[in-house]
Image (spheres, coloured by chain):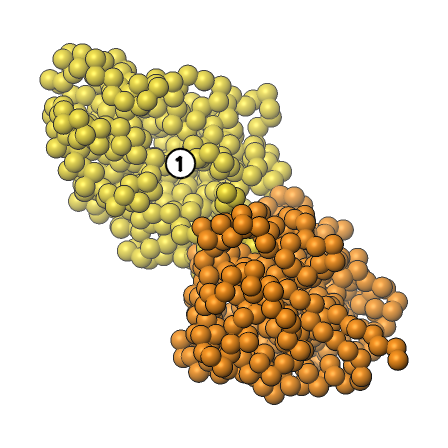
Chain colours: A yellow, B orange
Amino acid sequence: MSIQALIDELYLEPVYGLSQQEKDQKILPIINALTLKHEECCEAYGNILKVRNDSSRIADNIADVPFLPVRLFKTNLLSSVRESEQLKVLTSSGTTGQQVSRIVLDKDTSVYQTKTVVKIMQHFLGKDRLPMLIIDHPNVVKNRQSFSARGAGILGMSNFGRSHTYILNDDDMGIDWEKLVSFLEKYSGGPVLLFGFTFMVWKYLIQALEKTGRRINIPNGILIHSGGWKKLVEEAVDNETFKSRLKAATGINKVHNFYGMVEQVGSIFVECEHGHLHAPIFSDVIIRNPLDWSEMPANEQGLVQVVSCLPLSYPGHSLLTEDLGVLLGEDDCPCGKKGRYFSVSGRLPKSEARGCSDTFQENRP
Amino acid sequence: MSSQLAKLIDEKVEFLTPRVCSVEDVCAQTTLPIFSDAALSFINALSRAILRNTHLRQFPELIAFGHWMRRRNILSLKENLFQDLRDRCLVGRGVALHIAPANVDTIFLYSVLLSLLCGNINIVRLSSRRSEQLETIVELISNLLKDESHKEVAQRLIVLRYERSDSITGDLSKLADLRVLWGGDTTVSSIRKLPAKPHTSDVCFPDRWSLAVFNADDLVEFGIDDELVRHFANDSYWFGQQACSSPRLVIWRGKFENCRQASEVFWSKLSAAALHFSDDLLAVDYVNKLVAVDEMSIRGEIASSRVNANNLLSVVDFAKDALPQLEHHCGAGLFFQASVSSLKEIAPLLESKTQTVVSEGITKSEWLQFITECKPTGISRIVPVGEALNFSSIWDGMDLLREFTREITIHL
């Protein structure tokens, strides 16, 4: 059976309905097939496996699948498809001066990505397309050839909404009150989908509302947000604070953060009502001990490795991230979802420069 | 000195030693005689202050520094120098400007003290990056200098801290007769571009890397001593393997099968010995190594990597005909290895940046023969295992006591 046929079968299953064991049986053959495919089609990946003579190509379980450090995508364009088959190249949203990741998508991978997001999000949003507020400015999705991660995320989420309304101004990120008010007049009585990047929601919605003293009321709103907590952690804002201040400013009760990264399409780990991130059928998560890469037992912090069945066009089916996380359990979250659930506690702290040479770059005046 | 420098100094420079007078007045001091009593007594006092400080025991490199400057060791330096000199006459060069590297390394302190012993007036610039080790040492120095008995040294040793500033370093360079530059290649080159006096000499300590050479036949025949492994771990893992003298490459010399066997045993022992350093390495160090190894795999520079019990140790084999970049190395216990049947095969691996060879089981005469026959580029010292990081007044091929002084010849 082709990899595609195996992946197609996943869409027939409930997203969070299989036990970890049942799920492993479904996805392991796909993951192993991806390892073989990328070894054959991506020279760089093949070289890496050749040098690491430890990793067998056909793993007996998910934890034995070789993983790539996600940083490699910042320095290399790793592709398993010919240039003519490259549909688009996604880039991560690094801050100025930082190198960005580049991820090659072909048609199949791109279609799977969209289908997967739909399947996962429908679980939380239902099948109807809801009127949608986007906490960003319209220009963020203008250049369709080279999406930023933010742009790609927004376009991906837009499939679940209708009457898409970008509520920030292009020039100053201020709230476009006219647009917002007219949207709310029409839709705020019923369910409304809101989407934005965590930091954008915090700074340009919650804090902006708090500053002006204006309050909006969307009691049936569902906020989906992602992008990482780094900037909020710096301001000492945790998930609880975020939720309570959001509620105070907007009346929104339902909030789902999700964890994911541009480097691995299809891996969207959405937070349930208990604040746990859940692995859907398409992907999995492993927490590793940095000292020897062994699997960490539940409730102990380690490095997050993510696994996905979807990256057909590039070797990103098993990636070691630079995020720290904790496995919370398997098949037994009180929300009823099966499979693994976990939390992400932050970025790996940087090390300091040592030795005779000054690797530390001082700022020039 | 320009009034502009005085203004810049007032605004941007932090004095870490007592500000007894202006930078200008410090530079106007006369040099001290070489190995002056004032310098000896200051260094002896500093040695005692370091060795008595219980807080510093956690930094073995500072304890080694404290031991190096004990009276007996300094006096033997003096004796050796004076024996060489007979009745020749050395004097200090004048004002020495010391530029410390921007990391936590403290090796530049040795050259500061040697320069003081040579009679020079010393201006030491620290980068804005702070480390506990350096803060403590500078505080000890500063406290000693407040003591009236060290007045002569206090007038000739100032430690400054400022953000990188070409204008301040440039103005200080114009006052200097000698510049001692520690740092990466880029930093050293950029400071050398700043004009000094026409006669100013620069003593530079730019990027270097080091290796170890083991006699595999002996190791197989006589076994690998735990002590040897422990010493090698100290050579490698202190400073996170990022010191110039930390071995990054291990060459096994001997019969092919012996090289394979010796390396197998050695690495598994080192993997265990390295556990001693597990608190010094962070998760990000392991990720950095994984990234470094994968990047080299992608570039085709390495043929295989060894599977080890833990991530403290990573060992990779060269690809045939590939020369990995040893100068840019992430440290944290990443070793390249290669096997050779004779020493002369290592010559192509060496370059001017090659500094220390940690040698086990290879005799002095074998090395002399290698040097005579192969005329290798690089290598400035060959030391036994366990002594990679020991500082010596002959460093990077230079006798610092001679570099920091000038000779007055008297033909009468």
**In x, y percent, where is residue A271?**
25, 38
SS state under label 1: strand
Q: Residue at x 65, y 59 (%)?
A: B176
Residue nearest the viewer, comparing B192 with A105: B192
Image quarter for residue A199?
A: top left
Name the subunit of mark 1: A
Between B204 and B385, the residue placed more toward the observer is: B204
> Horizontal and vertical percent for residue B331?
56, 59
Is residue A48 or residue B52 the one in the foreground?
B52
* Residue drawn at point x = 60 percent, y = 24 percent: A83
Q: Pick the residue in front: B136 or B28.
A: B28
Could you tell whether A31 is left or right of B256 in the image?
left
Q: How many marks?
A: 1
> At which x and y percent is residue B118?
66, 74
For disc 1, the neighbor class at 10 Å (few under 14, some 14 to 19, many from 20) is: many
Identify the residue under disc 1: A261
Q: Is residue A231 above or below residue A123?
A: below
* Residue type, label 1: Met
Percent from the top left, x then y, of residue A54?
55, 54
